[in-house]
Amino acid sequence: MCKAGCGAPRTVLATDLDGTFLGGSAAQRTTLYDWIARRRDEIVLIFVSGRGIDFMRGLADELPVQPDHMVGDVGTSVACGPAYEPLPHLEQWLDANWPADAHARIGAAMQQHPGLSEQPIVGDVAAPTTSRITPMRRPPGTTCSGWASMS
C-alpha cells in the first residue's frame, strides 16, 4: 500500500461512505476494493463523509484498503497521515476564516426547519471548535431529547 506522497499518484478518488464506498453487494465491494488495492500506488484515496473522523478511523482499520486522507463532519474536519491526524495549519485556516457569527446564523436558519438539529461531535476530538457546526436531519418521529440542541 502506498500512502499519498510516496510516489506520483495520478488519480484522486474521493468517495462518500454510506451507500457508496460501503454500498453494493459483498461481491461488488470486493471487486472495488481489489481494483483499488491493485492500483494503490496510482490512487490517492479520500473518505468524505458526514460522519466523524473517529468513526472513519475505526472503519479504515476494518477495510482491506485504507484512505490517505479523511474529510469528515460534513466537511468541517480534515485528517491525514497514518494516524489520520488533523492538519493544524488547515484547522487554523478554517477557524480564522469561518465567520464569527456563523453559529448564530446557522442556528437561526435551522430554527426555520424543525427537522434539523445540530450534529453532535462524537469521540475524542482534540480541540473541538464552537464555531463550526453541521446540521443533521432528525429522523421522523423523534424528539429533540437525545439530539444535540442549539444553545
Image: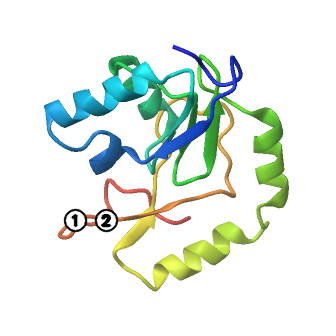
Q: Quadrant of residue 35?
A: top left
Q: Which residue is the extreme one toward the bottom?
A: 112
Q: Which residue is mark 2?
A: 138
- Residue 17 is situated, as x and y percent measured from the top left of the image, at 37, 43
Q: Nearer the viewer, residue 109 or 82?
A: 82
- Residue 77 is situated, as x and y percent measured from the top left of the image, at 61, 44
Kind of residue at badge 2 = Arg
Q: Quadrant of residue 87?
A: top right
* Residue lying at 32% horizontally and 23% vertically, measured from the top left: 34
Q: Nearer the viewer, residue 12 or 90?
A: 12
- Residue 92 is situated, as x and y percent measured from the top left of the image, at 82, 44
**Quadrant where the image shows the C terminus:** bottom right
Q: Which residue is mark 1?
A: 142
**Please, is residue 40 above or below residue 108 in the view?**
above
Q: How many tags in the picture?
A: 2
Q: Residues within 10 Å of mark 2 (few under 14, many from 20)?
A: some
User: Residues at badges 2 and 1 in contact (C-beta under 8 Å)?
Assistant: yes
Kind of residue at badge 1 = Thr
* Residue lying at 32% horizontally and 48% vertically, measured from the top left: 20
Q: Which residue is the extreme one toward the top?
A: 1
Q: Which mark is residue 31?
A: none
Give SS at disc 1. Answer: loop
* Residue lying at 36% horizontally and 79% vertically, measured from the top left: 114
- Residue 106 is situated, as x and y percent measured from the top left of the image, at 59, 73
Q: Nearer the viewer, residue 45 or 37?
A: 37
**Please, is residue 141 above or below residue 76 in the view?**
below
Q: Is residue 48 visible?
A: no
